Amino acid sequence: MARHPRGVIGAIAEHPFGFVLTFVVLFFLLVLFMASVDALPEPAVKVVVQPSDEVVQAGVAEAPVRVVAPSIGMDVKVENPTSTEISVLDDSLLRGAVRYPTSAMLGVNGTVLLFGHSSYLPVVYNRAYKAFNKIQDLKTGEIVSVYSGTTEYRYKVVGVRLADATDDVVELPADGKYLALVTCDSFGRKTSRFVVTAEFVGAYAL
């Protein structure tokens, strides 16, 4: 009488250990083959996007080197004298805007106070005399950018006013980050001047 073949299930039942070993070896060889042809699936990766230009470090004081107000076409170099002598400040005004030495630096609490000449003469050979010519045309909500060597600091205009000739006081709040732009003929003269105030909205790496 002929015997029936055992079949696959019968073979597995008789030699379970051998079957498992063979399966593991074949699976391992398959994985090696797929890896060699770059056919393995990539693991799921959670990507967290950080704005690469946003400055996250706070409290680093930096000197301003440039002030820009696109809405009025202003792009002016900023000088940083260390003396409050009128002659020193007036000399610095001949080269651009001036950060008043005792006002705040960029990146820290306080008010960055920038002075600049304004002149409406038909012919001006030194462009520094026209540095702040149009700051009175700035509108609430418009952006003024002040640059250090590494960072752009953005401020939003919150006020524009004409200060009386006898009013030589510019308030410098210290409980936040602010910017004040002031037109100036000379630090030694009391003349009417425009004052623009703005509040800090963000800093971005260059």
Image: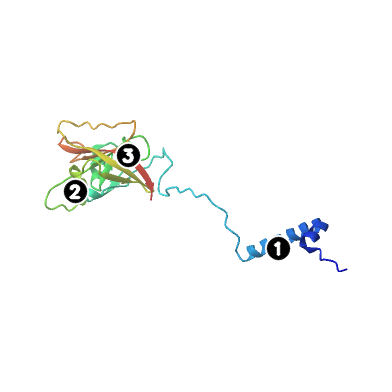
Residue 183 position in % (x across, y down): 20, 41
The amino acid pointed to by label 3 is Phe
* Disc sitting over residue 130 in the figure: 2
Marks 2/3: CA–CA distance: 25 Å
Question: Is residue 50 visible to the viewer in this orientation of the structure?
Answer: yes
For the N terminus, the quadrant is bottom right
Q: Residues within 10 Å of mark 1 (few under 14, many from 20)?
A: few
What's the residue at 67%, 61% (across, down)? 31
Query: Element type at marker 2?
Result: helix
Q: Which residue sits at x=27%, y=45%?
A: 143
Give the Cα separation between the discs numbered 2 and 1. 78 Å
Q: Residue drawn 37% across and 40% down?
A: 107
50 left or right of 129? right
Disc 2 + disc 3, Cβ < 8 Å: no
Q: Nearer the viewer, residue 70 or 109?
A: 70
Residue at point 54%, 51% (across, down): 45
User: What residue did someone put label 1 on?
Assistant: 29
2 or 3: tag closer to the N-terminus = 2
Q: Residue furthest front?
A: 1
